Amino acid sequence: MMTTDLEVNVDDLVKLLSPTMSLIVRRKTMEIVTQLGTPLDGSAGKYFQAQDFALGRAICQLCEATASDRTETLAALTNYTSGSIEAADFVLEHSKCVEIAYTSVVTNALYSSVASRLLVNVSRHFPDRVDQKLKARNADYIGALLAEIKKSVEVGDEDRAKFVGFTLVNLSTLSPIRRYIGGVGENESSPPSTTTTTNRPLPIVCELLTTAKTTEIRECAADILRNLAFDDGNAPLGLL
């Protein structure tokens, strides 16, 4: 059986992405892989899915295996998940890259900026599944992400903060998240013991409207507040 050019290229790339390959070979290969994920004409998704997701699996496995490659692997995954719901589904279902991205963001790792972009994409496609993943990692992950935005704004690193904000906008389309941010009752996203009067989510969101210098972050805060309005029950305790 003849092999298509697409399959040949993907097969070669997968071999070169092995964690056992030298760092310089992996970096050069990742440059090609990242570029393949850039087009929004559907070709990126085809590469990611070719040969039963061979390339997608290789990128995810390299991301999980070596921290030294994470700037490149997370950037590639961001590109592929931007226009391909199938790529986002694979990353969520068959890897720990979303958990890695979250940990990178809340610990302000060197690759936290690109990690936050991946969270934006997967939460846009599947907010409920991202919620489940991150909730298993940290029951109060919403509070942790909001704290990172506040901290980034305070130190002037608002470029990174805005992508975390976009993620929270996506997640606030979920009713349990809206109710948690609005402070109405308890929900599965955060146990009662983790939320105090000093770190309640809603005051932080409101504060960002006045303290953030960049338009994007102020718009994120406004969008989250707008989403809260979808639940009438939020208004009495959370917004008044």
Image (cartoon, rainbow, N blue to C red):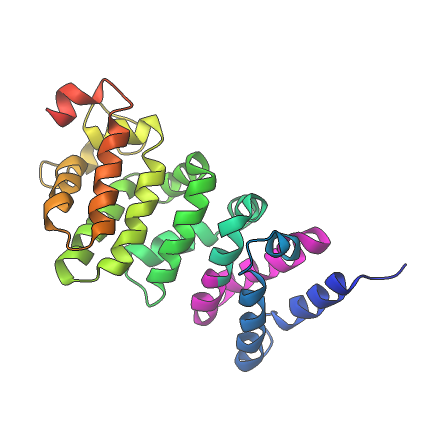
Image quarter where the C terminus lies is top left
Magenta stretch mostly in which secondary structure? helix
Is residue 113 left or right of 11 when viewed as pictured? left
Is residue 153 left or right of 190 when viewed as pictured? left
Q: Which residue extends farthest right?
A: 1
**Closest to the observer, 136 or 176:** 176
**Closest to the observer, 81 or 71:** 81
Residue 70: within the magenta?
yes
Q: Give the residue drawn at x 16%, y 62%.
A: 156
Quadrant housing residue 136: top left
Image x and y of residue 92, in percent: 51, 45
> In this picture, which residue range is highlighted in magenta?
48-75
Q: Is residue 138 visible?
A: no
Q: Is residue 111 visible?
A: yes
Where 195 sits versus 81, above or below? above
Total numbered labels placed on residues in the image:
0
Q: Give the residue drawn at x 60%, y 56%.
A: 44
Image x and y of residue 63, in percent: 50, 62
Quadrant housing residue 10: bottom right
Is residue 93 left or right of 211 when viewed as pictured? right
Q: Give the residue drawn at x 24%, y 18%.
A: 232
Image quarter where the N terminus lies is bottom right
**Closest to the observer, 70 or 41:** 41
Is residue 200 left or right of 81 when viewed as pictured? left
Image x and y of residue 68, in percent: 44, 72
